[in-house]
Amino acid sequence: MLNLRCATHVAAAVAVLFVSASAAAQAQRGKAPIEPFIEEQLPPVVQVIGTEVDGPVFATAQGRTLYVWPENDQNDQGVRGEREGKPSCTDQVTRVTAGFHEPYPPNLIEADIESRPACATLWPPFYADADAKPVGKWTLVERPDGRKQWAYDNMAAYTSNLDKEPGDVLGSGRMHAAGDSGAKRKPIGPEADVPAQFEVVTIPLGRMLTTITGFSVYTWDRDGNNKSNCDDVCQQTFAPMLAHASAPKARGDWGVIERSPGVFQWTYRKKPLYTLQGEEQRGAFHGSDIPGWRNVYTQPAPSFPKGFTIQDAPGGQVLANAQGRTIYFYTCIDDSLDQQICDHPTHTQKYRQAICGNFDSKRCVEQFPYVVAEAGERSTSKIWAIKNINAETGRYVDEGTPGAQRVWTYRDRPVYYFFKDEIPGDTYGDSWGENNGWINGFHAFFTREEFRKQYLDTSGSGRR
């Protein structure tokens, strides 16, 4: 049953983004911290850098985030994504559709074919020198043109033409992994340095700690440093996260306390850890609905723009403006063998305009208007930025260009409202588009979703 919070809990949920922690402070200054990770052998041309919301990622020597393109399924037309050891993203322009998106047939001419870029233009291969040697999980694969390319776990590695600065992870454009259609590129990084019973997942509120099976981990305000006050009555609701007697002693943020002779409990940053008894939904927030209990974040996400709010909505909680109007994002992946994303203003706008206005740009702006940034508003992070856009073309333009609007962007993509939403919590534009919006469409910016067995990206902190 949907459990919507009272106003005090909504405030508490927002407050996690404003915590005066060193990690959050560094992120707000534009320098993301490097979350602890498991060291591994790297080629001299690869480094690990911190990001605002994706944790540690592998990057080139110049700081460009590295991605892979794993296959996700097969159909009559072939594989979506790349096979291990078989890079297929080349300099050849894909001119026709693949027939992946039912009911559309294959061999239709792609949109804006005259300006359509080749796959390798959008995703430059991470080439290796002729004398490069494999190191650890880093291997070498041969491209169709005979050149060597670096690969991680035998998956060819690429950069993104959208990433401009170290710490950018703009290539995938992913916000909600659940339901995504097609084979999206994913950033790669080292495994999180957490005990074997835990993993770290990325959600809009930050890098959240869960059990290895994906269930949320909680702390209690009434506990002391390295001391649990959760008695027998408390344990009817919350179960201590027990550590094996052979578990390692304190290291970094991790430690154990002895609850009773021979019974040990994990602590994180000196706070004992628990799970919610009977919780069925992975990556959930039900425990933090109880006053004094909190989800655990290894790294909180940067604050939402000042004045944004979180509103209760059917299905969970959504991000909204100061008046409670729901905010939306747009996602798109085209029907081609190279599965190009089409959700960025530098990409063709034909797909978006087909969904938001039946190819009528004026109607598009009326139905899905941009979230305009007021004159005095400023961005305080890389992930939330303000850009100038031409509302008619959907393209970014320089400041001062006639007709330009200052709009808020998330991961370098504009965010929107929906014209039918009238009161706080309305989400009438959610899943507006093809295949419930996951092929090409709009989604409410959920910060908390109910009824999902798996919450957002639960693929861990390693190969994403």
Image (spheres, rainbow, N blue to C red):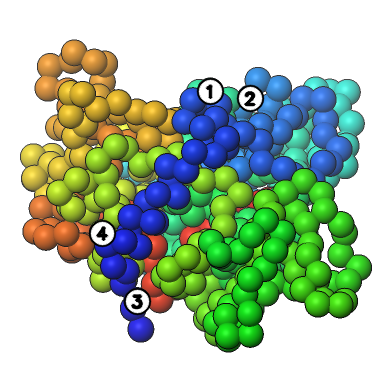
User: Are discs 1 and 2 less than 8 Å apart at CB?
Assistant: yes
Is 337 located above or below residue 459 in the figure? above
Q: CA distance from mark 1 to mark 3?
A: 41 Å
Q: Residues within 10 Å of mark 2 (few under 14, many from 20)?
A: many
Label ID, residue 272: none
Callout 4: SS: strand
Q: Earlier in the sequence, mark 3 or mark 2?
A: 3
Drawn side of residue 390 relative to residue 139, left or right: left
Q: CA distance from mark 1 to mark 2?
A: 7 Å
Q: Earlier in the sequence, mark 1 or mark 2?
A: 2
Q: Amino acid at mark 2?
A: Gly
Residue 415 found in image quarter? top left
In percent of the image, x 27 and y 50: which residue is there? 309
Could you tell me residue 193's position as x and y percent?
75, 50
Is 169 located above or below residue 333 in the figure? above
Q: Amino acid at mark 3?
A: Asn
Callout 1: SS: loop
Q: Amino acid at mark 1?
A: Glu
Q: Residues within 10 Å of mark 1 (few under 14, many from 20)?
A: few
Q: Specify the farthest residue to the top.
A: 400
In percent of the image, x 40 and y 76: which residue is there? 451
Label ID, residue 63: 2
Q: Residues within 10 Å of mark 4 (few under 14, many from 20)?
A: many
Drawn side of residue 347 relative to residue 184, left or right: left
What residue would you read off at disc 4? Answer: 311
User: Are discs 3 and 4 less than 8 Å apart at CB?
Assistant: no
Could you tell me residue 44's position as x and y percent?
82, 25
What residue would you read off at disc 3? Answer: 3
